[in-house]
Image (cartoon, rainbow, N blue to C red):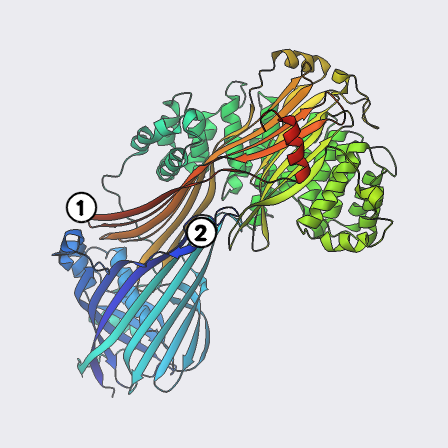
Amino acid sequence: SQLIQSALFVLSSAVSVFVLMSRTPKLSFFKRPYYTAKGILLLLVKYMIYIVLVNNYNPGANHLLLSCSQISNVQVESAGKRSRKNNIFHGSSAESILGKVRLEALQRPFMVLWKMGKVIIHFIMYHKNAEPATIKNLKRGVASMLMMQLKSGKMLEVNDASGKCLVEYKATKDQVIRIKHLDTCKTQEMGFTTHSPVLGVSGKSASETVITLENGIIKSADVEETHTLSNKLLKYFLISHRQSLTLKKIEVGPAEVAGKDAASVVKSLDDKLMSVGVMVEKVKTKCKGCPTLMDTWKAVRSQLEPDSLSKAKAPRSFLTLLHSLRKASKSEILTVLRNCSKTVLPQLVDAVTSAQTSSSLAAILEFLDFSKKEGLVLQERFLYTCGFASHPTETMLQSLLELSQGKIGSTDIKESTVIIMGALLRKLCLKGACEVPTVVKVKKMLLAGPDSTRVESEVQMYLLALKNALLPEGVPVLAKYAESEVGAFSTIAITALQRYNPELITPEVKKMLNRIYHQNQRIYEKNVRAAAADVIMNSSPSYMEVKNLLLSIGHLPHEMNKYMLSKVQDILRFEMPACKLVRQVMKDMVSHNYDRFSKTGSSSAFSGFMARTADVTCTYNLDILYSGSGTLRRSNMNIYGQSNNALLHGLQVTIETQGLESLIAATPDEGEEDLESFAGMSALLFDVQLRPVTFFKGYSDLMSKMFSMSGDPINVVKGLILLTDHSQVIPLQSGLRASAEFQGGLAIDISGGMEFSLWYRESKTSVNNRGALVVIGNVTVDTDFVSAGVEVGFETEATLDFITTVQFSEYPFLVCMQMDKTTFPFREMVSKQEKLPSGQTFSSKRSRDQLVPGSEFPLHLENSNMCKKVFEQAW
């Protein structure tokens, strides 16, 4: 016979959060050290546990063990020390916090079934009403803590409170160490995240339990569990969860109960007992007194007016509204949309689309009527927000596919729809959904698109969509159109190839690019040749390819000579990947000599650092190419973010002009004699190519714009973007659940303008970037009887202007480029909240404010000298 004993244990569980943040971005012009905020203790739960166990139980033996456990002496309190005034737990009993029903349920005995040290079934006693999920989860935590085996090795897919995980045991005579590989755990609640290594959230988790034995009985068990959530913008959270189980005494227990199997024994004890799994289940918490969607909208709508979009209050209100929209029904969302003023409606469309729920998508599609030309701004804002979606679904792509195949009142909206479908296609493929039916259908449509039409604007539309999609199968299609006789097709196709991984640029594609640059088969426009040279240099070029590029300098059109020379010098100065090979080629005096490297002109290429931190590097480059007559041919500004070998193309603004020589009675360059007068602007934002904007096209349109041109900038993109979006539930071994969320909202306004004066023989192009960024992260331990959480965040507002002034009254003409950043505020916040069902709350907040001084980003010395001449009266 076996001896039954009863053991008394004391168990305490504490959850704390450590926040490591940067005081300000460690900019190249403003350096500050990092600092670490103190760990913020959220919640401490203590109780005694009586466990009835068998004295000679051997966890390594191949048999079952059924034990009965009961929790008593429950305490719930704040883990941090604070005064009575600020301690909402002071004077509160377990019953007043949990409620009588929950406390009785928690103290009700429950049974656990082991097999070889693994909990396979968790029996909980039920009465007339089912126990709350929170109570069952806490009991699951107790059962999970007692799991062990006395033999070293790994166990696959072990179920416990954390989920179905890989567990590794290291056993000695009196100690067992259980290491749980939390990254392998499969849980019942799936969250979502932004699929971008630069903007997304990454995490690491670890769990180790040390069990001490004495005469085969557990003497103590200590659990240390950590979860690290890291975001490049906000640094990281460290969630620390500790449990300690200590044996107090052992005494003789009740008599053993015999039975055929475990189920029959349980039934003989109480036929109301039923079995449940040991994995933590979802807890549905009801929010009492929470504002409705309409209440939230009324509170924030004044802060979303167009004039407020450059202020931090706009993205902050946007994130607040987003949380409310994700809980709202379709009818609630439609009510708000239909009762919104015209000035704020575009911002509301941004928020509804960014919510990315089935209700919000259904509501916005019902609200917008794409068959009418009216509402063009709202329709385009919806499409652009779809393109920036943090975690798009197949349903969203299917909706755009159906939209593109239906009646659309505006040609511009038709083009934007197809272009954005390419962006969604890429994001779904990054999520591993590249083979779902809708994605496969859209793939075929985009790949066949350019050859399916002879309308020039439609061909450009499909090429821009392929530029967004970055499909490996799209490389041959883009290579074909790169050699097109239509300059616009060539430019789009080549710039699309530039976004591909260099490994996908095959030798055949490189040969094609070299044919274009060196004009082996026909003459190409300068901007097409310059784009081809950029791709060659960025795609692991060979020694001969680099040598031929250098040898071409001196045999190119005047301004292109200067552009290529600046490009080579920029590669060397900024130490780009091709710099070693360029230096090797330059050892040859035929390639590198004074005649070749002394070419003059106004075109230029320059790269520099905007900001550098330990995790993220932000760079910019400015490329300006002029025609021989002095008119702008192409202006290209890029901003990149790089982290851990991952690249984010944050911004690209390109202004292109052609056929303006007739205005100043100048001679066009070779291959550009018959080009139609044109000026336009194209933007790429956060890896998403947007529909280009045309300033004018054709001589008659040019002349009408010349006399009506006000110099006011033309808007390219304006709105609210959900930059970072991460949500997950972390089941802790104690049975508690920690919810983590990161959201980053960006209010942005990008515009471009062009002024042209024949009287003063001067032109000016400007790209104005204004924005406000708010990033918030929070971790909450939320049960149905207490809620405790910590929130950190920062907000900032910034303006970046790029202005190019050209004076062509004499030759060589004068060109001055300016890239200015205004002084901007930076604010950082940390707050803690606790709330009891009784309504008692505690909150504490800290914030730090400062101004980061403005500056003009440095460009090359030649540009500085030119600016002095252009603005000599001001110097």
Local SS, label 2: loop
Could you tell me if residue 756 is visible in this image?
Answer: yes
Q: Nearer the viewer, mark 2 or mark 1?
A: 2
Q: Residues within 10 Å of mark 2 (few under 14, many from 20)?
A: few
For residue 48, the mark is: none
Q: Which residue lies furthest to the left in this view?
A: 91
Of 831 and 723, the residue lying toward us: 831
Whole-Å distance between the Cαs marked 2 and 1?
A: 41 Å
Res 649 → quadrant: top right
Question: Is residue 327 depicted above or below 223 in this figure?
Answer: above
Q: Position of residue 502 (x, y in %)?
A: 70, 50
Could you tell me if residue 747 is visible in this image?
Answer: no
- The total number of labels drawn is 2
Which residue: 26% across, 78% down?
259
Classify the position of the C terminus by image quarter. top right
Q: Earlier in the sequence, mark 2 or mark 1?
A: 2
Q: Where is residue 352 in the image (x, y as percent from the top left)?
A: 43, 33
Q: Name the residue under label 2.
A: 32
Local SS, label 1: loop
Instruction: Give the amino acid type for the residue marked by disc 2 in the picture.
Output: Arg
Q: Where is residue 845 in the image (x, y as percent from the top left)?
A: 28, 47
Q: Mark 1 points at which residue?
A: 839
Task: State left or right for residue 266 relative to residue 742.
Answer: left
Question: Is residue 497 depicted above or below 43 in this figure?
Answer: above
Question: Is residue 780 depicted above or below 857 in this figure?
Answer: below
Of 691 and 411, the residue lying toward us: 691
Q: Where is residue 449 in the image (x, y as percent from the top left)?
A: 70, 34
Of 586 and 199, the residue lying toward us: 586
Q: How crowded is mark 1: few (under 14 residues within 10 Å), some or many (20 or more)?
A: few
Res 806 → quadrant: top right
Instruction: Give the amino acid type for the residue marked by disc 1 in the picture.
Output: Gly
